[in-house]
Image: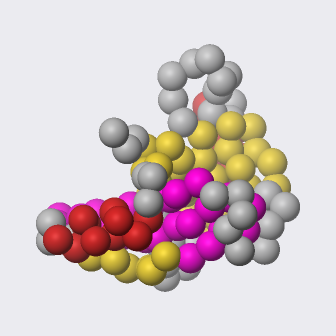
Amino acid sequence: MPRPIHFDIAADDPDRAMKFYKGVFGWKFNKWDGPLDYWLVTTGEKDEPGIDGGISRRNKQMPGVMNTIGVPSVDRYMKKIEAKGGKILMPKMAIPGIGWFATCQDTEGNVFGIIQEDTEAK
């Protein structure tokens, strides 16, 4: 069964946001070595329940907080989402070395991501 595996937080000022979350929760941040300004967030130890995430600069595609759900096939789940009344806001795209990603919207207007792991994605 697909589960949330990652969260994203959009920030007008990523440095300010990281300072806030580190100060309140003790989260750790590492700059991602990818094509975007993105910081990976570690929220706890690997043996503790919970998920890790990321922080990026706010933009039209990323206006707030978004959870990402791991799926075995982005193509298949995009079809399922639309068949059940949801929308695809940003179609399937490669995140190099990570996998395939799409941004979606549920029937209530909530935005979420789906991701299929594939280290060969380009």
- In the rendered image, residue 115 lying in the magenta stretch gets the answer yes
**The magenta stretch spans residue 109:** yes
- Residue 5: give x, y in percent of width and height: 50, 43
The correct choice, above or below, for 101 with respect to 52 in the image is below
Name the residue: 62% across, 73% down: 94
109 and 17: which one is in front?
109
Instruction: Report whether residue 84 is seen.
Output: yes
Find residue 32 and report its image quarter: bottom right
Taking the spot 40% from the left edge, 70% from the top edge, the residue there is 75
Identify which residue is drawn at 37% across, 79% down. 89
Q: Position of residue 76 (x, y in %)?
A: 35, 65
Q: Position of residue 20 (x, y in %)?
A: 65, 45
Locate residue 51 relative to residue 96 in the image: left or right. Answer: left
Apparent side of residue 8 relative to residue 94 in the rendered image (left or right):
left
Q: For the N terminus, give its image quadrant.
A: top left
Q: Is residue 38 visible?
A: no
Which residues are drawn in magenta? 93-117
Per the picture, the main secondary structure of the magenta-coloured stretch is strand
At x 66% / y 24%, what residue is drawn? Answer: 46
Question: Does residue 48 sit above or below 37 in this rendering?
Answer: above
Q: Nearer the viewer, residue 104 or 16?
A: 104
In the picture, which quadrant includes the C terminus?
A: bottom right
The vertical placement of 100 against 5, above or below, is: below
The x and y percentages for residue 29 are: 76, 45
**Does residue 50 appear left or right of residue 30 in this picture?**
left
